[in-house]
Image (cartoon, helix red, strand yellow):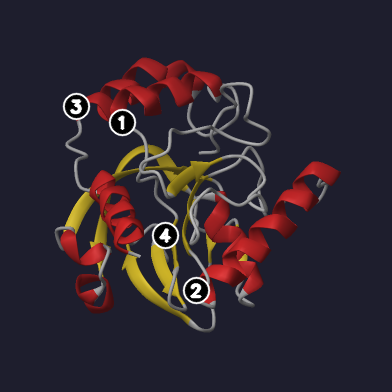
Amino acid sequence: MRPWRSGPRSATGWECETTTSCTTTSSESPSRPTSSATPQWSWAGSPFNVTATDKTDEQLRLERDLERLAAAGIEGRTNVMFTCFGIGVVTRLLGGVVTLEHPEDTGPAEIALTAAGRADELFGILDPRFQAYTAHKEGTAAVPPGATLLAWNDACPVQAYRAGTGLWATQFHPEPTADAFVARMRVYREAGYFDADAFDEVSAQVRTATVEQPTLLLRSFAARAVAA
């Protein structure tokens, strides 16, 4: 699910708070540096879809900015974590395919780590199987060239991968709490991600699910940033 706009700084997506002084979870143009000598970025989605055929100038500019940021992460000049829309941008940059063939329903989904995921410095702290929130219409068809698959499930075969030395990308959302996810659902109630008449049922599933593991990724990412 694409995040909503919240706050005066949000140009294209849901604005999250910084996790550490040198880690930014951002919805601004990523071409702007942080105060750290080695900026760390976590991108929590966008109100856009990579597969859209009628892209605005704003979306095209954002995609170019994200591609530059992704290239910096792949080359090890910064550390970045992209989610949802972000993984689509990176997949295309690497020569992969973003498709409408692997959508997922709104709510909790079971995700499984690959052997590489269990050995990864960020994903290795997670349980081999864990619950995460998903809601998307597009996804990566297959792990793109040069990337290492870290997580998957039956509905969406590419849930997460790593590319180069400093870039991680996820299809699932590691950033929201249950309350934040339900708030996001209210904004997108009529956007086709779920049956609008089933809002109460779907939100109850979100609130009663045990989704604790994904936020550990952001903590791990922040710790890596501090140690950089």
> Residue 156, labelled with which disc?
4
Residue 142 tag number = 2
Looking at the image, is 28 positioned above or below residue 122? above
Q: CA distance from mark 1 to mark 3?
A: 12 Å
Residue 101 numbered mark, or none: none
The residue labelled by disc 3 is 208
Tell whether 59 sits left or right of 194.
Answer: right
Q: Earlier in the sequence, mark 4 or mark 3?
A: 4
Q: Disc 4 and disc 3: Cα gap in Å?
A: 23 Å
Q: Residues within 10 Å of mark 4 (few under 14, many from 20)?
A: many
Dot 4 lies on which element? loop
Of the residues under marks 2 and 3, which one precedes in the sequence? Answer: 2
Q: CA distance from mark 2 to mark 1?
A: 28 Å
Q: Are marks 4 and 3 in contact (CB under 8 Å)?
A: no
Q: Earlier in the sequence, mark 2 or mark 1?
A: 2
Which of pointers 2 and 4 lies earlier in the amino acid sequence? 2
For the residues bearing labels 2 and 1, Cβ distance under 8 angstroms: no
